[in-house]
Image: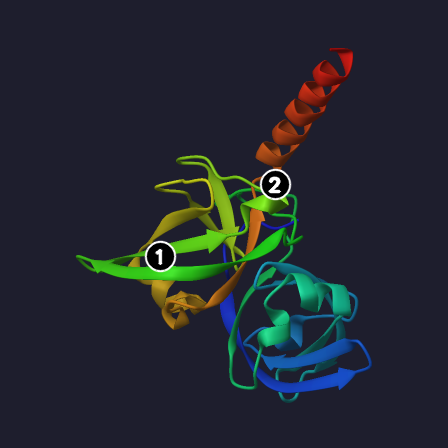
């Protein structure tokens, strides 16, 4: 479980395909603190550390084919930046919102506007997958906990302050960029319960 508060970005140093899997090696400041089997969020995707090179401050994760198909990790190139967050501890403040590290779908950045030192990013997603946003609700974009503004049926915007812009990979986004979305877990449960209720009512008719 994560909070959506990114610790830092890691830089991809090596990508290695093995059948349907992709081994991703990256470097970050706390790589020497990581342990094999530890869970870390990468652009909002919870993945397991499989190797650590403390001398080089590098570590490796493995993404299976399903993860590559349902997230933007399959689009990574050497030199790209990835948002990182280690899993929450029970005594950690929940500064963001509850994030599982299970990406629901990807979205495309369709607009970027700078407004008096901050930025507004608009993302468009496939509404047929059954996910929704609500005004002032929470959403995770590449693992970053954000508040929804201008919620619509198939798109939404988020406001990004300078700190978030600088210390996450938001500074790399432009129209056409693909990001990972994880919708609010409470909203997903409510939506499923309501849908099941409505389906039951229709069966009774």
Residue 186: % across, % down: 60, 33
Residue 121 badge: 1
Mark 2 vs mark 1: which is more N-terminal?
1
| Position above or below: 104 against 61 | above
At label 1, counting other C-alpha atoms closer than 10 Å, the crowd grade (few under 14, some 14-19, many 20 or more) is many
Identify the residue at image location x=61%, y=83%. 57
Question: Where does label 2 land, which residue?
Answer: 130
Query: Mark 1 and mark 2 in contact (Cβ < 8 Å)?
Result: no
Which one is closest to the eye, mark 2 or mark 1? 2
Q: Is residue 44 left or right of residue 36?
A: left
Residue 127: % across, % down: 54, 45
Residue 17: % across, % down: 75, 84
Q: Nearer the viewer, residue 40 or 76?
A: 76
Quarter of the image for the C terminus: give it. Answer: top right
Identify the residue at image location x=61%, y=38%. 185
Identify the residue at image location x=78%, y=76%. 21
Residue 20 badge: none
Residue 40: % across, % down: 66, 63
Q: Quadrant of residue 62?
A: bottom right
| Position above or below: 169 against 46 | below
Q: Is residue 66 left or right of residue 27?
A: right
Can residue 135 be seen at all in this image of the molecule? Answer: yes
Q: Quadrant of residue 128?
A: top right
- Local secondary structure at mark 2: loop
Q: Is residue 183 left or right of residue 205?
A: left
Identify the residue at image location x=40%, y=35%. 135
């Amino acid at each position: 479980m994560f909070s959506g508060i990114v610790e830092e970005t890691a830089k991809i140093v090596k990508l290695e395909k093995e059948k349907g899997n992709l081994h991703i090696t990256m470097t970050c400041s706390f790589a020497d603190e990581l342990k094999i089997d530890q869970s870390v969020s990468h652009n909002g995707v919870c993945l397991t550390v499989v190797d650590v090179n403390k001398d080089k401050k590098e570590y490796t994760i493995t993404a299976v084919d399903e993860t590559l198909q349902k997230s933007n990790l399959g689009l990574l190139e050497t030199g790209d930046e990835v948002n990182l967050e280690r899993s929450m501890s029970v005594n950690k403040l929940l500064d963001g919102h509850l994030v599982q590290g299970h990406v629901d779908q990807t979205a495309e950045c369709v607009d970027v506007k700078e407004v008096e030192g901050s930025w507004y990013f608009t993302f468009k997603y496939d509404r047929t997958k059954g996910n929704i946003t609500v005004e002032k609700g929470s959403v995770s974009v590449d693992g970053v906990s954000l508040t929804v503004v201008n919620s619509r049926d198939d798109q939404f915007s988020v406001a990004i302050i300078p700190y978030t812009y600088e210390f996450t990979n938001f500074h790399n986004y432009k129209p056409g960029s693909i990001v990972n979305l994880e919708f609010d877990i409470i909203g997903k449960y409510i939506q499923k319960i309501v849908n099941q209720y409505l389906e039951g009512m229709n069966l009774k008719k």
